[in-house]
Image (cartoon, rainbow, N blue to C red):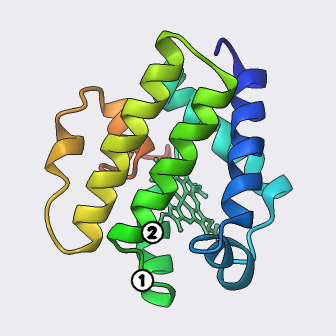
């Protein structure tokens, strides 16, 4: 896995599988009515930031899943399926260091999200390291300069 094109291939393939999944598919299609073409660049920003430390994802992924969790509870089974699908998709398309990072970081972010949704702290995520990746996962807000007046 080398660049944004590779990330885009991975993300497309992952969501094709996720949308078709009997357990979590309906969350994307029936509940969130997720428009993949709209989301693709956002997902690519996110994964480029997580895998290649690109620092280009500046949104808060956690709050979004928190809102989603109120409409469709995201529990252990859902997160396990998400990780299973992500891991299998990465393995089917890529091998190597970046692929390993994509899987490991996804696992960390998923368990942190899950813990936070269940009301705990996101401590595993807090150990990941860079602010950039914490921000990417919605664990912290991106530090922004106050607007000039
Ligand atoms: C059960 C597990 C999960 C479900 C059902 C799920 C579902 C969704 C849905 C429906 C959206 C689109 C929401 C909208 O804009 O309307 C979304 C966005 C997103 N998800 Fe997940 N998700 C799950 C886990 C994860 C995990 C583990 C990660 C990261 C490792 C992740 C990363 C993202 C990102 C980056 C976005 C885009 C956020 C943005 O718009 O800035 N999701 N997810």
| Residue bearing the label numbered 1 | 73
| Residue bearing the label numbered 2 | 78
Q: Residue, x 63% and y 38% (percent of image)?
A: 89
What crowding class fits label 1: few (fewer than 14 Cα within 10 Å), some (14-19), or many (20 or more)? some
Mark in the foreground, 2 or 1: 2
Q: Residue, x 48% and y 60% (percent of image)?
A: 81
Q: Locate residue 142 relative to residue 72 in the image: left or right.
A: left
Instruction: State the SS at label 2.
Output: helix
Q: Are marks 2 and 1 in contact (CB under 8 Å)?
A: yes
Residue 116 image offset from top left, x and y in percent:
24, 65
Residue 8 falls in which quadrant of the image?
top right
Residue 113 falls in which quadrant of the image?
bottom left
**Is residue 46 visible to us here?**
no
Residue 96 image offset from top left, x and y in percent:
52, 10
Mark 2 or 1 closer to N-term?
Answer: 1
**Near-viewer residue (101 or 80):** 80
**Near-viewer residue (41 or 115):** 115
In which of the image's four quarters is ligand 1 placed? bottom right
């Amino acid at each position: 896995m080398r660049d944004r094109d590779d990330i885009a291939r991975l993300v497309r393939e992952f969501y094709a599988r996720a949308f078709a999944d009997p357990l979590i598919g309906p969350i994307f299609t029936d509940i969130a009515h997720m428009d993949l073409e709209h989301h693709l660049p956002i997902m690519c920003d996110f994964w480029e930031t997580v895998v290649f430390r690109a620092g280009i994802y500046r949104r808060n992924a956690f709050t979004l899943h928190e809102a989603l969790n109120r409409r469709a509870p995201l529990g252990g089974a859902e997160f396990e399926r998400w990780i299973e699908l992500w891991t299998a998709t990465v393995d089917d398309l890529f091998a190597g260091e970046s692929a390993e990072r994509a899987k490991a970081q996804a696992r960390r972010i998923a368990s942190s999200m899950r813990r936070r949704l269940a009301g705990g702290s996101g401590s595993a995520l807090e150990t990941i390291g860079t602010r950039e990746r914490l921000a990417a996962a919605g664990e912290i807000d991106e530090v922004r300069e106050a607007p000039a007046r």
